[in-house]
Image: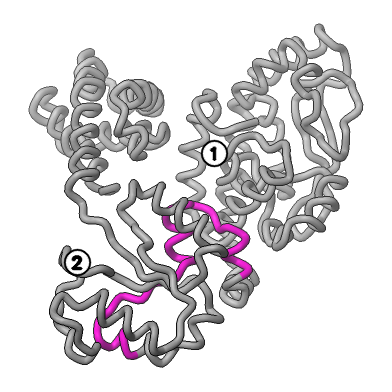
Amino acid sequence: MKKLPKIIDILILFLINVFLLKYSYFFSAFISLFLFLGFYAFRTYELDTMNSLNESIIRIFSGFMMGSMMLLVFYPFFENQMCRYTFIYNLLFSIVIFPLIHKIEYILYEKHVSPKKYLVIGKKNEIGHILDEIQQKTLNKLQFIDYINPSPIKLEELVNDGFSKKEKSRIEKIINFTYRNNQTKYDAIIVTDPKLEKIVKDKLEEYKKAGIPIEYLPNIAEKYLKRIPLEVIERFEYYYSVIFDEEKESPAKRIVDVTFGIMLSILFFPINLIFSILIFLEDGRPIIFKQERVGKNEKIFILKKLRSLKNTKIDPDNPNKKIDQSVLKVGKIIRKFRIDESMQFINVIQGTMSLVGPRPEMIEFHEKMKKQIPYYLYRLKTNPGITGWAQINYKHTTTLEDYIKKTEYDLYYIKNRSSLLDFRIMLLTLETMLGMRGAR
């Protein structure tokens, strides 16, 4: 479902440029790719967006403008090929056709994709809230039917009854059955507790050989929640401790950081100069806000920002307390569009930060959180970032519960970090910068 709308959109854009604008295959593919990246950056392909025509139109239009701006960077190379109707035709087709197509795709998905039903090895009172959230996220396409604190005999009874579409028979007789048949009660088994898994390990091995899908909570939770709940890490602690202790940092990331850090510093220099003058005129010096923050492996560094707040003392127990009352007039602008963060490109060049990573915390707050949030220190396995997975997926944090949820997103990034994920985060940050999602 997630891949199909993207493929259809790229294909339609390609055909528009080939047959309507008479462009070459290469140039049509080039235009289609950049417009698609704009759509992707504004989360056009999320189910909630596809379900709403108004939301689709807004996000497709925003994405189109972003993709067009990226295209214009290459205009000098294609000046002789690009006609005046390029953007008009692509825009009209995008905002008229794509929202309707996405709505149809959503309806077909909701009505015709069969739900996948699970027998859960685990206790509902302990893990049910996470599985309920997954079920909600998937529009009930994943359903967790029965929970079992298993004995081998009880598990065998449920499997024989729930997976066989014939009369009750033993597992040896159902090797060749069709799992996704509506007559079956379950389609797969999901393990949510390794301790309970040990009790029925032999039976599970038997069922695997018989062809019954055996899945595990970490994979399902990460795939659909896009974070790692702390309860899941606690249950599968050995699995996660091995992964988090791996050194996954690619040398290519440092090269990308330095290259883009220099380019973006030059690009933002005129903007920073203008806002520096406005800050000085409104509230005097200092113009640059400097503060000690905690970086990779708990090393302390000096973070730099354009100052957006009045010279007031920050409450270390709650750094966000009364923050709205202390924002400068010019600060409201630079905070809304994240311009104040652009000074951190200097930190990126210096190597104390990356373009993408968990946000760095103040020392006092870090000391407090590492005592209250389990596995908090795993988020320091990489350099902190100007933007990050938590920043584009979660709201501004003010309570302990918020910081726990934010940490879960950070841990997802630490486990799954890659160049492709970094690129995805940078694209989605464009939407956050315009205030359509995410938080300060």
Give coordinates of residue 192: x percent, y percent.
Answer: 49, 70
Q: What amino acid type is highlighted by mark number 2? A: Arg
> Circle 2 is placed at which residue position?
180
Q: From the image, give the main secondary structure of the stretch colored magenta.
A: helix
Task: Tell me which numbered mark, 1 or 2, is placed earlier along the sequence.
Answer: 2
- Secondary structure at numbered mark 2: loop
Distance, label 1 to label 2, CA atoms, is 36 Å
Residue 83 in view: no
Q: Quadrant of residue 92?
A: top left
User: In terms of depth relative to the viewer, which is nearer, 403 or 282?
Assistant: 403
Residue depicted at x 54% and y 39%: 392
Is the Cβ of the residue at disc 1 closer than 8 Å to that at disc 2? no
Residue 366, placed above or below residue 5: below
Give coordinates of residue 424: x percent, y percent.
Answer: 45, 45
Relative placement, left or right, of 206 versus 410 is: left
Residue 11 in view: yes
**Magenta span has 72?**
no
Residue depicted at x 28% and y 21%: 79
User: In terms of depth relative to the viewer, which is nearer, 109 or 25?
Assistant: 109
Relative placement, left or right, of 115 versus 424 is: left
Query: Which callout, 1 or 2, points to the residue nearer the camera?
Result: 2
| Magenta span | 206-234
| Residue 392: numbered disc | 1
Q: Quadrant of residue 207?
A: bottom left
On-image quarter of the C terminus: top right
Say few, some or many: other residues with alpha carbon within 10 Å of mark 2 (under 14 / 14 to 19 / 20 or more).
Answer: some
